[in-house]
Amino acid sequence: MNLSTSKQISLINASLTTALFGVLYMVTLTGFFSFTYYPLIVLTPLVFLFVYVVSNLLFDQYIKDKLKVIYKSIGLLKPEIDLAKTKKLKNDELEIVNNVVLKWSEEKKKEIEELKELAVYRREFLGNISHELKTPIFNIQGYILTLLEGGIDDKNINERFLKKTEKSINRLIALVEDLEEITKLESGELKLKEEVFNLYDLTREVIDYMEMKAANNNTKILLHASLNKSMKVRADKKRIRQVLINLIDNAIKYGNPAEGRITILAYNFHNNYLIEVRDNGIGIPEDNIHRIFERFYRTEKSRSRDTGGTGLGLAIVKHIIEAHRQTISVRSKEGEGTTFSFTLRMG
């Protein structure tokens, strides 16, 4: 039978005390009185039992007092409840203390790792946003300085530089608007206006809107037969339109430059519809897939800036879908293409 530490100590204490009692008893009686075994035989087990019980109680109380201090020190709530549970355990009291401290240590270690990840993310975010803001600001500064230094009188460059300045200003405005929108989505400040609408009609409207941009990039947008004309969903129509535009725009940017093809599909998925936006573009490296929805994250930074955009499109898409209490995912194979899938509740 395995004994706990308190019982082992109590047993040793009782044994030593009883042995000492026996020695003192024999020495005392031998020196002053006639020695008899009968009282020794009767008293020895009583002394042993008394010392064992008292020692065990005192040690248990000592351990529980220390446990309370440890619980309070490491910030665990309701130590009385946990201590009450320990009374039912037959484990070693010191083992209980060890487990509590180890659990606390693991939780703190996890918190530290999370804080480190957040610190890295914050540094990346600040670096990215400063770069995104710096590029159009410096462009605007360069164009205006050129105009101020005499270029405004040159008809060959003044209109061209003013148009470039306008383009950089529009990029800044788009960046600020996207940042504002994603902040509202994250904070829950932006309320959804859910309604029942025809998903096919909305998708066809978005395709018509994006058709010219797709054509300029040698890309065709196809509506798969799986998306039938009677499909209705319950969602915020304006936000879902934005989701479709962002996903199609992303597919155009990173599509096949020679012969791009974007296909939009839909499937019944329990009480939801599963919508997919599929392209035959460059794909996403496997190591980057898990970060694709992060703000400003770009798999090919130099190229993606050339294609325009704020770097917030996919982050906004993710927040919109999650605000609808739905899910979005991505699967991709480098060199073959990418598929974004999200769900919407049936209307």
Image (cartoon, grey):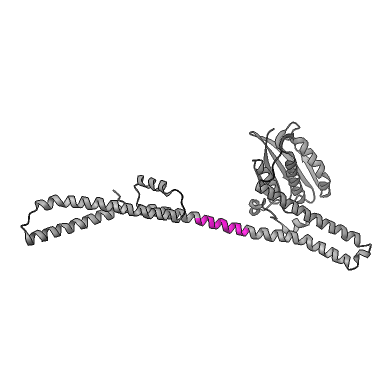
Front-most of 161 and 255?
161
Q: Residue at x 44, y 54 (%)?
A: 72
- Image position, residue 53 (x, y; %): 25, 50
Q: Decide whether residue 40 is among the magenta residues.
A: no
Q: Inspect this view and state whether residue 133 appears.
A: yes
The residue positioned 60% from the left and 57% from the top of the image is 118
Residue 307 visible from this viewpoint: no
Whether residue 32 sits left or right of residue 94 in the image: it is left
Residue found at the far bottom of this picture: 149
Magenta range is 108-120
Q: Main secondary structure of the magenta part?
A: helix
Residue 261 pos. (x, y %) = 77, 45
Residue 19 lies, in percent from the top left, at 18, 57
Q: Is residue 112 magenta?
A: yes
Answer with left or right where residue 14 lies relative to residue 88. left
The image shows residue 162 at horizontal and vertical percentages of: 87, 59
Quadrant occupied by the C terminus: top right
